[in-house]
Amino acid sequence: MKFINWLKNILNPQLATVESAGTAREAVKEQDKEKTMSASNSGQAYHNNMVGPVMRAGDLAMAVIEAAKIDNPGKEIFVEDKRAYIRIHAEQEMILRQETIEEELGRPFKMNDLEVDLSSFAGQIESQDHAVRFYFNKKL
């Protein structure tokens, strides 16, 4: 038994110090679980306040990114490029105007055409004739 304790101390000194909390493995697993849970909960709450489109990658997505920056002054626009799709989001509210998207695309654009490349979205959506609004009423 002394040899096993000696080996534990050599291989992982942390394990020897948590013996009193039950088995060393269970204590370490519990600590890792708590760290993971607190990190995922705070990260999840942060993402719950984010709204915006998830678009298929392409020229329209690039125009939407620029339009989001122009149409939402003072807001930080977050862009996650996942190669096949691009997640564009901001906290609480994002507005995209047809006129701005047309300027960025360099051609006429109908707001209904946004749905073709819109894979998904975060938050609630309000469609208008010349704009779309992504929003979230409840702040976490």
Image (cartoon, rainbow, N blue to C red):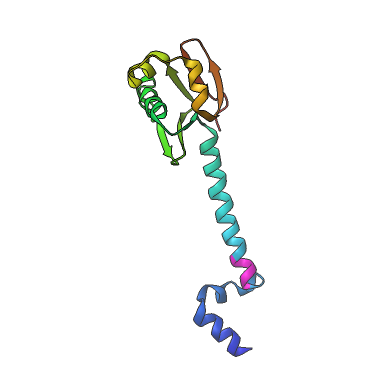
Residue, x 41% and y 35% (percent of image)? 79
Q: Is residue 82 above or below residue 121?
A: below
Outermost residue toward the top in this view: 129
Percent position of residue 68, x then y? 39, 24
Instruction: State whether residue 105 is above or below residue 44.
Output: above
Question: Residue 123 at what x, y percent from top left?
Answer: 55, 27
24 up-or-down from 131: above or below: below
Q: Position of residue 20 (x, y in %)?
A: 63, 73
Q: Residue furthest right?
A: 22
Q: Quadrant for residue 2, please give it.
A: bottom right
Can you say which quadrant of the picture contains the N terminus?
bottom right
**Magenta-colored stretch includes residue 27:** yes
Give the mark count: 0
List x then y, in percent, for residue 38: 56, 49
Q: Residue at x 43, y 34 (%)?
A: 57
Query: Which residue occupies the foreground of this view, 110 or 38?
Result: 110
Q: Residue at x 48, y 21 (%)?
A: 114
Magenta region includes residue 58: no
Q: Quadrant of the C terminus?
A: top right
The magenta region covers: 24-28
The main secondary structure of the magenta stretch is helix
